[in-house]
Image (cartoon, rainbow, N blue to C red):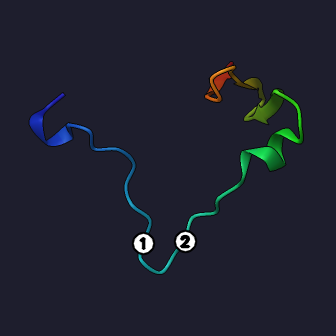
Amino acid sequence: MTPNEQDAGPAPAPANQTQRIVESRELFRGDNEILISHDGAIYRMKITRQGKLILNK
């Protein structure tokens, strides 16, 4: 990692474009685990006991 790449993170959205926010409770609907299909693969997203999200392939 070069000094200019430190904690770069994702590029910001253009000023005239907003990013969509989805509430996790809308995705999970009371469950602690969901499956997500992406590009032909299935991913599992879980809510931990500490309230964190974990995504596994």
Residue neighbourhood size for the residue with mark 2, other residues' Cα within 10 Å, grouped as few (<14), some (14–19), many (≥20)? few
Quick check: 38 left or right of 30? left
The label shown at residue 14 is 1
Work out whether 15 lies above or below 56.
below
Residue 25, x across and y down, in percent: 79, 45
Work out whether 42 lies above or below 13.
above
Task: Identify which residue is drawn at 69% across, 20% down.
Answer: 49
Work out whether 45 lies above or below 10.
above
The one of 9 and 31 positioned closer to us in this rendering: 31
Spatial CA span between label 1 and label 2: 8 Å
Check disc 2 and report its element: helix, strand or loop: loop
Quick check: 45 left or right of 50? right
Residue 12, x across and y down, in percent: 39, 61
Quick check: 43 left or right of 29? left
Work out whether 21 lies above or below 39.
below
Residue neighbourhood size for the residue with mark 1, other residues' Cα within 10 Å, grouped as few (<14), some (14–19), many (≥20)? few
Task: Identify which residue is drawn at 73% across, 35% down.
Answer: 39
The quarter of the picture where residue 1 lies is: top left
The quarter of the picture where residue 50 lies is: top right
* Type of the residue with mark 1: Pro
What residue would you read off at disc 2?
Answer: 18
